[in-house]
Amino acid sequence: MSLEEKLDQMGVNKDIQTQLKELASACKEKLGLDEKVILKDFDKALEQTKKLSDLNEEEQLQRAFMKVKGDYKQQLRSPAQFYEGVVLAVAEPFDLVGYQRRQALAAWKQDKDKAIEDGICDADGRPLDTKELFGKRANPNYGQPLPDHRYLTNMFGVARRQGEKDWKIFNMTLGEAHALMEVPQNMPVTFRANEPDSQPDDGSLKLNPYSAIEFKKLDAEGFDLESLYTSELLKKYRIDLNDIQAAHARLQGDPNNRSRMVLVEADVSYMNTQSERSTMLVLEDSSLSLDADGITVWVPKHLEGLLDFGSGSRVLLLGSTLEMTRDDGVRYAMNAMGFYAIPKYKMPADENPKTAVTTRDMQQVK
């Protein structure tokens, strides 16, 4: 059924039909969107306006059109490109001002007058921004009260510009406005982003988020997540568990892998979903000797929806390496950023007893 036939069926008058077709044509030319996407959004907006009982049918149609038109006019003005891909890893949001706030509050507690004199806190004890410069650029918030939080999060996946053939690894940092948004992982999506002029030298793609970025799920027949995790694109991230110390050292300061991210294929020997901090996994693979400890992996709260498996499962896991100081020496662990349980080796989710995480596992992470 054509767009015109569908609009006729919905009872849309010719004036709005003409404007909708013009909008759909512009979106197809500049944004690469099929007219079905515009129609779907119009249908959704119409369902909303139908709930406005004070409007007659003609007014409902007009309001629905104005909403869709307003939404897409903003997108048409932006130079951001459309991409399709799969988000495989999303790091736990990091609070950029958390450490500075804690230090300021500790200084206030120790000596209020000195904290005020040093410009660390104001007279009411509120932590102040003490960073005068960002590189060579002046910080416009210098001396002003710090916000309660200022989050950012890093994400990783594979993507390509709509209409292009070749897939690339991409990295993108979501700032304050988007750092806590829900991002669908392990499924095909489309999203808009900008490519900065400066790109990594390893062939990967650095993207900056579009100001109104959203990740829309795509129907992709025959999509195979296991093949993606094990593809040549991700091969350079693969390590065995006994190589985690060397990988941690090698990735320190790597400008193309600031998260020290690695990919492992391993078996889940233990799961504890009752930890106060986060879910804990212990992974083992054939590279570890029989008497070696498994590798501890912390799963942050925003990834717990992916935990649809139990101990005994084999997983493909992307995570950042950690160096942990314990009473008995230095140990290495991981913070999970994304994972996938291989269906062939997937065990049912455990009913875990409430077990305590040992003190040594909770000691300071470098």
Image: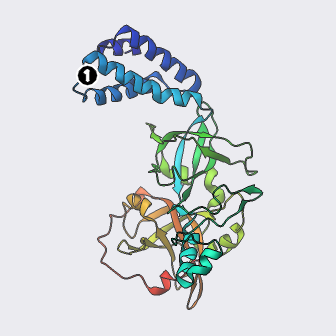
**Among all residues in the image, which is located at the extreme left?**
53
Of 202 and 93, the residue lying toward us? 93
Image coordinates of residue 15 in percent, x first then y, are 40, 9
Which image quarter holds the N terminus?
top left
- Residue type of the residue flagged with mark 1: Leu
**Among all residues in the image, which is located at the extreme top?**
14
Q: Is residue 220 above or below residue 93?
A: above
- Which SS class for mark 1? loop
Image coordinates of residue 70 in percent, x first then y, are 46, 27
User: Is residue 242 visible to the viewer in this orientation of the structure?
Assistant: no
Q: Is residue 180 above or below residue 334?
A: above
Q: Is residue 161 above or below residue 315?
A: above
User: Is residue 108 visible to the viewer in this orientation of the structure?
Assistant: yes
Residue under the point 63% across and 57% down:
141
Q: How many marks?
A: 1
Of 180 and 268, the residue lying toward us? 180
> What colour scheme does the image use?
rainbow
**Residue 275 placement, left or right of 108:** left
The residue wearing badge 1 is 55
Residue under the point 62% across and 48% down:
170
Of 155 and 20, the residue lying toward us? 20
Q: Residues within 10 Å of mark 1 (few under 14, many from 20)?
A: some
Residue under the point 48% across and 42% down:
215
Image coordinates of residue 35 in percent, x first then y, are 46, 22
**Residue 32 placement, left or right of 353:** right
Q: Quadrant of residue 37?
A: top left
Image coordinates of residue 282 in percent, x first then y, are 46, 74
Residue under the point 70% across and 69% down:
252
Which image quarter holds the C terminus?
bottom right
